[in-house]
């Protein structure tokens, strides 16, 4: 059984001095008022990638408004496929970047679901292709030899083919009339 990294949110409660006391005490109500820190932009190899918050107040109107995020995810996936192909990608960094891709895709899909007219959403075919690519990137992240990612040839050919599919569908979406927002 393989172990997974453990991620914890540590919430520090607000402290309130008790009546007649100089030392602060913890109140139960203070836990409800604390919020986790906002998601910050992330930098991978000196290129910024923004992790989208699923509950950002702005509701997208069409798939064209989400096109920059899709292009950003596409650039990240192209870099990951290239790194996997090189055989010199550090396993830890590759895993972090593939998780970043997966979470960015998750946020993109949540934002896409908020677009009200069904016809204005990102085509389901493109989203499914991106999900397949995410699964292949996750499989590639598990192919490590020592500290480096070394993928079998079959997985590499599937990664390249899926990346080409996603890039082609994204180009078609970007060239559609009305996709500029």
Image (spheres, rainbow, N blue to C red):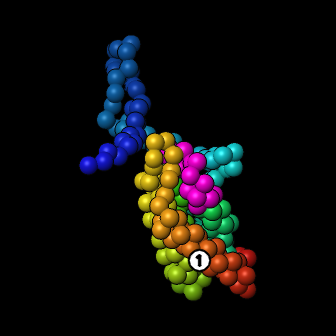
**x, y percent for residue 153:** 50, 64
Residue 93 belongs to the span the image colors magenta:
yes
Q: Nearer the viewer, residue 181 or 28?
A: 181
From the image, give the main secondary structure of the stretch colored magenta: helix
Q: Which residues are magenta?
A: 79-94
The quadrant holding residue 120 is bottom right
Q: Is residue 52 above or below residue 26?
A: below
Q: Which residue is mark 1?
A: 165
Secondary element at tag 1: helix
Q: Is residue 123 above or below residue 22?
A: below
**Crowd band around label 1 with a 10 angstrom C-alpha radius: few (<14), some (14–19), many (20+):** some
Q: Residue furthest left?
A: 1
**x, y percent for residue 96:** 51, 48
Report the residue at 47% width, 61% height from top.
152
**Quadrant of the rendering where the C terminus is positioned:** bottom right
Q: Is residue 16 left or right of residue 112?
A: left
**x, y percent for residue 129:** 52, 75
The quadrant holding residue 93 is top right
Q: Is residue 141 above or below residue 32?
A: below
Report the residue at 44% width, 54% height from top.
143
């Amino acid at each position: 059984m393989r172990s997974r990294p453990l991620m914890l949110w540590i919430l520090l409660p607000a402290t309130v001095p008790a009546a007649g006391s100089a030392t602060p005490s913890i109140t139960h109500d203070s836990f409800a008022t604390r919020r986790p820190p906002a998601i910050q932009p992330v930098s991978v190899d000196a290129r910024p990638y923004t992790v989208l918050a699923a509950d950002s107040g702005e509701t997208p109107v069409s798939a064209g408004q989400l096109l920059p995020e899709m292009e950003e995810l596409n650039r990240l996936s192209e870099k990951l496929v290239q790194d996997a192909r090189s055989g010199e990608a550090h396993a830890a960094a590759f895993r972090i970047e593939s998780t970043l891709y997966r979470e960015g895709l998750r946020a993109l899909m949540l934002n896409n679901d908020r677009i009200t007219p069904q016809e204005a959403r990102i085509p389901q075919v493109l989203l499914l292709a991106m999900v397949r690519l995410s699964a292949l990137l996750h499989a590639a992240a598990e192919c490590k030899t020592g500290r480096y990612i070394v993928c079998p040839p079959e997985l590499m050919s599937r990664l390249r083919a899926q990346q080409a599919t996603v890039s082609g569908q994204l180009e078609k979406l970007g060239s559609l009339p009305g996709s500029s927002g």
